[in-house]
């Protein structure tokens, strides 16, 4: 117990608890070269496609102190509430105010650096306070927690890290609540976890139930049965439920609006396949008990990242066999650790723990709880003297090494290297050479632990160096292969892109109508060494786009755009590719700006409908069908115009052929156009990776051979023209693609001519970026077109006033906002109200009053 001697034990402990993680995390950032310690930024995975862009919007709102609950920079438009609640509520995010937009990646790196250090400090503090032992081993526990397997694999998902910081604080508070009836720290910790990330808050609330069971068992008198023990703990259980409920209620101002918003996403649907009675991982899982079990390539699909350092893996096994640990304590620890393990392994429990959904990548998001638990019991066992059991330490080390070896054997037998863009197989890719490091660390750790058991001061220090080296190596392996970005290149390219896009926006800003501006920025995309679609780049460049990628994507946006032909991989993504002449017009896609490596190219469409258009009342009854884009487009225009004319005409298929060469699978379709106009090939739900398209021998842009592309433009055809589309694919397609259709431009132009005279004229369209929740406009209504359709997703949060009178919002086109109008000119005002905000605020007020009332009542009871 190295630091317990002397009156300055606490001071020395806290100095080391802060200094060691700062030095270790900084050293790792320096070795990897992460800014601000090096030239690289962490713009990889979702940090490059989501978090950076969301932080950009947060910075704008904080800088201008202009907060809006709705944004038109998210695809068609959407509520910002779930974005804030899931990604942006960490207090540390205030750091971004001290950095320019081009330096946002550096600010994010710095936030991550601080969070990793705080995770370690928090855990060290917890161990010292819980056991009242300010020992160097508690510092080691903190460092192991701050760089555990979960952190090494997911640290760039920085919105989850706040929960790891607050978890030790909250658990300490739970212990004080259980033992002494003092709830303050538990309440503060739990509210902080829920408020900073509701998803992690949910995960940890389940853990709290397990931890309460752990405490109840740990304090069970030997003469009481299970039922009698529960009865004896009735007051503790009641306090736990009461204060947990009040804490959740106090967070309701965030929880209620977020829950309502999340119900508007595609994640509300439950899949029976996620509740099948089966395991989620096999006998290869012991690989992850040792160093280097996972790397960046397997981040989306892999076994649980159990790694917490050999010291604590060995220590947790020794705990269950040590003569110094009581049977009751072992049973209690078994409930806690076993509950976490089974919760990860058994699919229904795993699904429940992940908020009733299976993660779309980044699995086993509660595995940090396993690391927390084994660090805690190892430290407890260490204080009780179990490191003195030399033979048990050696046997446990051998046993763990053997288990890891078995894991490697099964990983090599069962494992398949994770194929690019394929996520439906177990990720069991391992580097067998790493097992040598596993054995080496096991041996030297066991030797050092034996020395610690003999109270050898040098062994304790040596153990710390071993642990630091092991954690560092694991972090390096976990980040091996990460396509880090170059921060200097980012700053230069971002500045150039902002200048180019801003110049175009300024040039056309005098236009008094709303428009959407699609940008494909090749130099910016080329900054990333993995496929980058720029889903959320509208936040960076302030242009109204149509693409989006977020766990909070509105289901109506996904449904309408996907069913009309826009590319979509899953319920979280909509790409800007997939538009047609029809969707370009009705969704206001006026500008298409391609910034190439050489000169940029701007396409300007003369007419679009803007933000809204008048439609026949049939639009309120239109139902779009999945994977039937051409039918949906035809029915969409028919519903708008109130006619049965055909706006899409299928060509005649002349011939089809399939052939195989040494280099690719070939497909050829010859067709004759039956209408004059642009033609398209539709290939739904097919990953067009390594696919090239040729129309009459001319190769199409590589843009149409990317993630999720579905609607492929064939060009403008004359009626009777015979054309040939040829496809070269690296992998065999399920069938010969031949779902082709052409747009009858004569009929479509008539519809457009009517729409141009009956547009929704938006007032101050340039203010939408700052105040998307409030806008006004006017429209002239005549004929049979009496439904105003706004191309924003249907949301019950919208309140509409027509000529000063409240009007009901209707669903149009299966998922857009509609307003029923009468003939004549109308002034229309739209105001977005965050649904559940008032109710959540009232529940929060009730929760806070409940906490205050309970405190007063307890004080009154104490005086009696």
Image (cartoon, grey):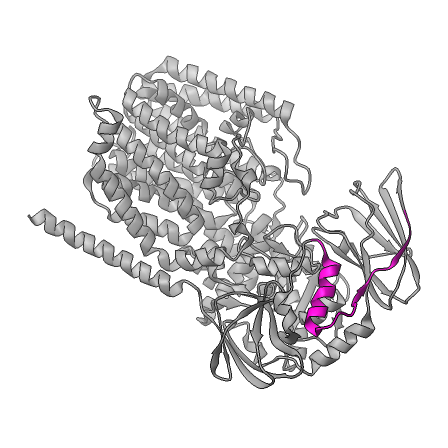
Corner quadrant of residue 816 = bottom right
Residue 238 image point, x, y percent: 24, 42
Q: Is residue 198 above or below residue 557?
A: above
Residue 367 image point, x, y percent: 46, 36
Q: Is residue 230 visible?
A: yes
- Identify the residue at horizontal 80%, vertical 42% (top origin): 730
Tag count: 0
View extreme (left): residue: 864
Q: Is residue 96 above or below residue 414?
A: below
Corner quadrant of residue 9 = top left
Query: Which segment is the magenta one?
Result: 627-656
Q: Nearer the viewer, residue 674 or 708?
A: 674
Q: Nearer the viewer, residue 649 or 348?
A: 649
845 left or right of 23 in image:
left
- Identify the residue at horizontal 50%, vertical 73% (top origin): 808
Residue 436 image point, x, y percent: 56, 22
Magenta stretch: includes residue 648: yes
Residue 503 image point, x, y percent: 66, 74
- Identify the residue at horizontal 81%, vertical 49% (top origin): 737
Q: Is residue 115 visible?
A: no
Q: Nearer the viewer, residue 787 or 192?
A: 787
Q: Is residue 402 above or below residue 333?
A: above
Corner quadrant of residue 504 = bottom right
View extreme (bottom): residue: 824
Magenta stretch: includes residue 511: no
Q: Is residue 798 above or below residue 248?
A: below
Q: Quadrant of the N terminus?
A: top left
Q: Nearer the viewer, residue 564 or 855?
A: 564
405 left or right of 782 in image:
left
């Amino acid at each position: 117990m190295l630091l317990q001697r002397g009156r300055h034990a606490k001071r020395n402990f806290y100095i080391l608890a802060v200094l060691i993680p700062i030095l270790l995390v900084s050293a790792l950032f320096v070795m990897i070269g992460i800014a601000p310690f090096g030239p690289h930024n962490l713009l990889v995975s979702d940090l490059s496609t989501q978090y950076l862009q969301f932080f950009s919007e947060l910075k704008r709102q904080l800088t201008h102190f202009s907060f809006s609950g709705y944004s038109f920079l998210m695809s068609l438009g959407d509520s910002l509430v779930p974005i804030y609640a899931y990604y942006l509520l960490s207090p540390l995010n205030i750091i971004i105010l001290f950095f320019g937009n081009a330096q946002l990646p550096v600010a994010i790196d710095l936030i991550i650096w601080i969070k990793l250090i705080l995770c370690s400090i928090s855990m060290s503090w917890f161990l010292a306070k819980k056991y009242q032992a300010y020992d160097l081993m508690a510092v080691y526990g903190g460092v192991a927690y701050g760089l555990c397997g979960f952190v090494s694999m997911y640290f760039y998902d920085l919105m989850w890290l706040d929960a790891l910081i607050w978890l030790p604080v909250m658990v300490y508070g739970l212990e004080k609540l259980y033992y002494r009836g003092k709830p303050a720290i538990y309440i503060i910790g739990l509210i902080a976890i829920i408020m900073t990330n509701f998803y992690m808050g949910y995960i940890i609330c389940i853990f709290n139930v397990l931890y309460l069971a752990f405490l109840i068992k740990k304090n069970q008198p030997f003469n009481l049965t299970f039922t009698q023990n529960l009865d004896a703990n009735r007051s503790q259980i009641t306090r736990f439920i009461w204060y947990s409920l009040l804490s959740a209620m106090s967070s309701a101002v965030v929880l209620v609006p977020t829950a309502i918003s999340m119900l508007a996403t595609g994640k509300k649907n439950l899949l029976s396949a996620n509740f099948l009675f089966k395991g989620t991982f096999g006998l290869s899982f012991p690989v992850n008990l040792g160093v280097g079990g996972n790397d960046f390539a397997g981040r989306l699909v892999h076994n649980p990242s159990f790694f917490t350092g050999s010291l604590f893996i060995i220590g947790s096994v020794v705990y269950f066999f040590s003569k110094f640990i009581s049977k009751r304590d072992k049973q209690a620890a078994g409930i806690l650790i076993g509950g976490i393990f089974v919760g990860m392994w058994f699919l229904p429990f795993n699904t429940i723990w992940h908020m009733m959904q299976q993660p779309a990548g980044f699995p086993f998001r509660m595995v940090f709880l396993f690391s927390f638990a084994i660090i805690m019991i190892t430290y407890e066992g260490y204080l009780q003297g179990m490191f003195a059991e030399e033979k048990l330490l050696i046997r446990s080390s051998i046993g763990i090494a053997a288990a890891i070896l078995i894991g490697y054997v099964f990983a090599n037998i069962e494992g398949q290297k994770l194929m690019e863009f394929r996520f439906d197989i177990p990720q069991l890719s391992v580097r067998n050479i790493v097992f040598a490091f596993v054995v080496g660390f096991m041996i030297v750790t066991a030797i050092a632990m034996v020395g610690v058991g003999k109270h050898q001061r040098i062994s304790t220090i040596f153990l710390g160096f071993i642990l630091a080296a092991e954690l560092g190596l694991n972090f390096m392996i976990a980040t091996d292969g990460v396509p880090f970005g170059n921060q200097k290149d980012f700053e230069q390219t971002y500045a150039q892109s902002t200048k180019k896009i801003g110049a175009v926006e300024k040039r056309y800003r005098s236009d008094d109508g709303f428009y959407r501006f699609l940008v494909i920025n090749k130099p910016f995309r080329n900054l990333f060494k993995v496929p980058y679609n720029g889903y959320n780049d509208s936040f960076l460049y302030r242009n109204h786009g149509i693409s989006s990628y977020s766990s909070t994507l509105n289901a109506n946006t996904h449904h309408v755009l996907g069913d009309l032909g826009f590319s979509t991989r899953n319920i979280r993504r909509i790409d800007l590719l997939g538009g047609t002449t029809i969707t370009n017009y009705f969704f206001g896609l006026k500008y298409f700006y391609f910034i190439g490596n050489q000169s940029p190219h701007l396409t300007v469409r003369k007419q679009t409908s803007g933000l809204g258009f008048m439609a026949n009342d049939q639009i309120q009854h239109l139902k779009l069908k999945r994977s039937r884009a051409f039918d949906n487009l035809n029915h969409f225009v028919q519903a708008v115009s109130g006619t049965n004319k055909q706006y899409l005409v299928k060509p005649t298929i002349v011939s089809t052929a399939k052939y195989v060469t040494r280099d690719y699978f070939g497909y050829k379709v010859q067709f004759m156009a039956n209408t004059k106009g642009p033609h398209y090939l539709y290939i739904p739900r097919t990953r067009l990776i390594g696919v090239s398209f040729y129309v009459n021998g001319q190769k199409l842009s590589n843009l149409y051979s990317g993630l999720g592309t579905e609607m492929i433009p064939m060009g403008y055809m004359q009626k009777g023209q015979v054309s040939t589309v040829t496809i070269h694919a690296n992998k065999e397609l399920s069938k010969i693609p031949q779902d082709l259709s052409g747009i009858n431009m004569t009929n479509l132009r008539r519809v457009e001519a009517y729409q141009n005279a009956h547009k929704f004229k938006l007032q101050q369209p340039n203010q939408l970026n700052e105040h998307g929740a409030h806008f006004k406009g006017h429209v002239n209504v005549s004929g049979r077109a009496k439904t105003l359709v706004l191309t924003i997703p249907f949301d019950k949060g919208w309140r509409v006033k027509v000529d000063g009178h409240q009007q009901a919002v209707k669903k149009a086109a299966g998922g857009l906002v509609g307003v029923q109008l009468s003939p004549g000119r109308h002034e229309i005002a739209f105001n977005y109200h965050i649904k559940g905000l008032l109710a959540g605020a009232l529940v929060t007020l009730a929760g806070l009053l409940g906490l205050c009332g309970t405190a007063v009542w307890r004080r009154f009871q104490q005086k009696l």
